[in-house]
Amino acid sequence: MIVAIASGKGGTGKTTVAVNLAVALDKPVQLLDCDVEEPNVDLFLKASITEREEVLAEVPRIDLARCTYCGQCQEICQFNALAVLPETKIVLTFPELCHSCGGCFAVCPEDAVVPDQRLLGHLEIGQRGNVRLIQGKLRVGEAMSPPLIRRVRQASSPNGMVIIDAPPGTSCPVIASLRGADYVCLVTEPTPFGLNDLELAVGAVRKLKIPMGIVINRADVGDGRILEYARRESIPVLLEIPFERSTAETYARGEILVEAQPIWKERMLLLHDAIRRRVADL
Amino acid sequence: MYELVVLSGKGGTGKTSIVGAFSALASDKVLCDADVDAADLHLLLSPRKISHHEFRAGHKAFINPDLCTSCGECLDRCRYGAISDRFEVDELQCEGCGVCVHFCPFGAIEFPENHCGEWYISETRFGPLVHARLGIAEENSGKLVTLIRREARRIAEEKKLAGIITDGPPGIGCPVIASLGGASAVLVVTEPTVSGLHDLDRVGSLANHFQVPVSVCVNKADLHWETAHAIESLCREKGADFAGHLPFDPSFTRAQLEGKTLIEYEDGDGAARTAVLKLWEHMRALLKAR
C-alpha cells in the first residue's frame, strides 16, 4: 500500500504525520522523502545512511568538430537550452534549462550532440528500526525537482507499506510525488489559508483520481471551515489533532512524537487503521 | 526602487502573515504574490480585480486519433511516459518537449499552446496587487512568477512608487529561483525548529548563489528559544542580517480568520504587533540604505 502525505499549504504537519505514522507501525515501512527541495524527514528520523548516489540529468554538449550549424537542435528544443550562431560558429548550451527530452540528440544529422550531465541532487537510503528511509536532496540552485522525485519513487519497492512525504503546493513536483499512490492523506489546518490551499490540493488529487482523506492539524486553533468543506465534498476526515504546546516543543527539538508521547502513537495507529480500511474497501 | 522578497524555505512559517502586515505598514508600493502555486495573500487583502489575463506557456501534445496509425514511434521517443498504449497523451505527464510531434511520420500529433493559469492586477486597501493562479497540476510556475514580478515592476515604475513587496513561494526550486533574481533584499521568515533551521540554511545558500542580500527573522521564537538563538548566531556567523524575533501569538491566526492583517487587528497584549512594527522599521531602514 502506497500512502502519500500531502497538503497545499506548507507547514501544516505533513512531515510530522509521515514520520510518526512510519515509526508507529510495528512492521517494515519504506518512508520516502519526496520534498526534495527541503527534505526534513531525516532531521527527525536520524537514520543511518548506507547508500548515496548522484542523480544526474542528461544534457547536450556540442561536438564542434562535427557541427555544421544547421540549427535543427535549436529548433526542436522547446526549452531554449540551445542557441546556434552560424555566423560566429558558436553553439551555446544552457544545461540548466534542459528537460532531457532527447530531441536534440535525435534530430542532429551529424551526431554532433553528445551526452553530458547535470547534477540534480542526491538519492540517499538508510534505515532506522522498522523504517527504511529513501530521500532525495535537490542541489541548491537546481530548479527542476520532478526527475529527482521520480528517482526516489523508483528506488522504493511497491511491496509492503510505503509512506510518501510530499512537497507542498499543487504543481509538477506534487504530481510526481503522488502519482501511483493508493491513497492520499491531506494534512491541513482550519484557517482561511489552510482551506484555500486544501481546495487546490483536492483538485490536484482528483485530477490524479486517487482516493483521499483529510487530517486536521491544530484543529482547535481556527474554526469549523474544514469540517464543513469535507462534509460538502464528501471527503472523510481521518483524524483531528489539537494544538499542544508540548507537541510544538518536541517537534522543535527534532524528536519523534510517538516516542515522546503515548497519545501520538494512538493517533497514528488510528490514522493507519482508517486509511487501511478505506483502501481495502476500494 | 526596491523589491523586498519574503521567502522561508520551509512552508507555513508565516511569510504571508508578515507580508500582509508589511502591506499595511509600507507606503507607496506594489504588492506581488509570487506563491502562484498556493496563493494566500488575497485572503488578507480582499482585492478588487481590475484586469484579468490568461497565462499561456509551453505546449502539450495531442494525438489526433483519425490520423494515428499506432506505429509506436511517439511511444518509443517519449521520455516522460506520457503516451499510453492506446496512443493517448497524459496531460499531466507531458512536458511539452515536442519530440513526438517532430518525429510522427503521419503528422498526427498536434501541439497546441498550453493555457496553464491566470494572473490579475487588483486594487486593495493598501495599493495595487499583482497575483496569479497557476492551473492545478501545471508546470511553468517559474515563468508565471517572472511574469507577475515584471508586471509589478512596471506598475511601480509607472506610478513612481518606492518599491515592491513580494510574497514568495516555499522551497528552493523553480518558482523560488524565479522570485529571487534582481531582488534588492530577501527576508527569510523561519521558525525555531530543526526543520526551520535546516531549510533556512538551504534558502540562504540559494540567495547567496544569486547574490541577493539576506535578512532573517524567527517567527514563533518563544516556542523554542534555544533554536531561535542558534539561528541568530548562525546569521551573525554567516554575515546575514538578523532582523529580529517574533513571538508565537494566536492573533496572527485570529486576524487571518477575520480577513485582516495583524496591524489592523486589535487583540491581546499586542506583542506580535510591536515586534512586526520593529521588523518593518528594520527592513525599511535597510532598504533605504541600499
Image (cartoon, coloured by chain):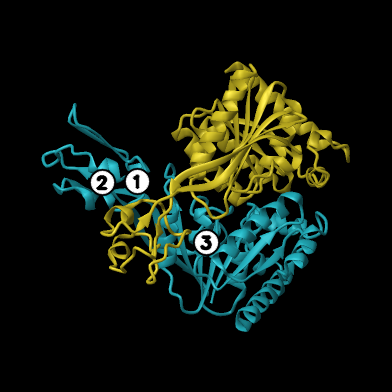
Chain colours: A cyan, B yellow
Given residues A213 and A87, the one toward you in this image is A87
Instruction: Read off the chain for label 1.
Output: A
- Could you classify mark 3 by the number of other residues whose Cα lies within 10 Å: few (under 14), some (14-19), or many (20 or more)? some
Q: Are marks 2 and 3 in contact (CB under 8 Å)?
A: no
* Element type at mark 1: loop
Residue at x 43%, y 53% (from the top left corner): B60
Q: Earlier in the sequence, mark 2 or mark 1?
A: 2
Chain bearing tag 3 is A
Q: Nearer the viewer, mark 1 or mark 3?
A: 1
The amino acid type, in three-letter code, at marker 1 is Cys
Q: Quadrant of residue B274?
A: top right
Calculate the distance from the C-alpha at mark 2 to the C-alpha at mark 1.
Answer: 8 Å
Residue A157 in the image: state x and y as whole percent: 43, 74
Mark drawn on residue B102:
none
Alpha carbons under labels 2 and 3: distance apart: 38 Å
Residue corresponding to mark 3:
A46
